[in-house]
Amino acid sequence: MKRPLVIGDIHGGLRALDQVLKKANVTNDDKLIFLGDYVDGWSESASTIDYLIKLNNQIECVFIKGNHDKWCEDWLKTSDANSIWLFHGGQSTVDSYLNYEKNELKKHLNFFESMVNYYVDDYQRLFIHAGFSSMHGVEKEPYESNYSWDRTLLEMALVLNETKLDENSSIYPKRLKHYSKIFIGHTPTTNYGIDTPIITQKLIDIDTGAAFKGTLTIMDIESQEFWQSDNLPDLYPNEKGRN
């Protein structure tokens, strides 16, 4: 049986990705689930996508699309760079593609287009970049943008963790009852002064701030053991990362 591993937001930090895969002793017999935001931040966004495309040919992988990936996909498709995207790390991604040929850009676009909005495994564990709002579950979400932008799911889980509300309670949020566990990225745990994954009753946030001054995290889904890279500014000492 393959060991399932989940990986947080990379944001162009290829050196951090290489570190955590080695620390977790990842082999071709494992299964890797990536939670999105592969680009925008550090200088190796395009190289990160090259690396992931090759990795996908060696190991079973699931690639979930994040909000930054959607921005990059749109740019690769139209050559129109969203000014908000450029400000929030997109400029470093554009710069990383300066020497790429058209056929290489097309290959990367195909990769972005093949990403999924979410993934539910055989154990009813949900993997999604950000969240969803539907009480009927992720499949019934009326607003596709919530998959890569929503933060209310994490906020709700944090409140539940504080109140220790039982799942059998009549007021327990119905959208959480569909899944045994929910793994997310998108919101850095460092926003809450925490440099390790946030583990609540049902939700686990493993975005530990790799876009900024934090680390990249990989977690064994079954045991919840995790490994972290060095802080990204230490791996990219001459760069600033994301705004």
Image (cartoon, rainbow, N blue to C red):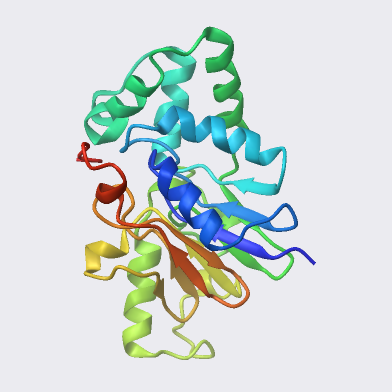
Above or below: residue 207 compared with residue 196: above
Which residue does the image show at 42% across and 44% down from the upper left? 15
Which residue does the image show at 23% across and 68% down from the upper left? 192
Residue 135 makes an appearance in the image:
no
Rendered location of residue 80, percent (x, y): 36, 14
Above or below: residue 23 compared with residue 62: below
Rendered location of residue 148, percent (x, y): 43, 46
- Number of labels in the image equals 0
Please indicate whether residue 197 sits to the left or right of residue 89 in the image. Answer: right
Rendered location of residue 202, percent (x, y): 50, 76
Front-lying residue, 211 or 78: 211
Q: Quadrant of the C terminus?
A: top left
Rendered location of residue 66, percent (x, y): 45, 43
Q: Residue furthest top?
A: 102
Above or below: residue 230 compared with residue 87: below
Residue 59 makes an appearance in the image:
yes
Which residue does the image show at 43% across and 54% down from the upper left? 130
Which residue does the image show at 60% across and 30% down from the upper left? 111
Q: Quadrant of the N terminus?
A: bottom right
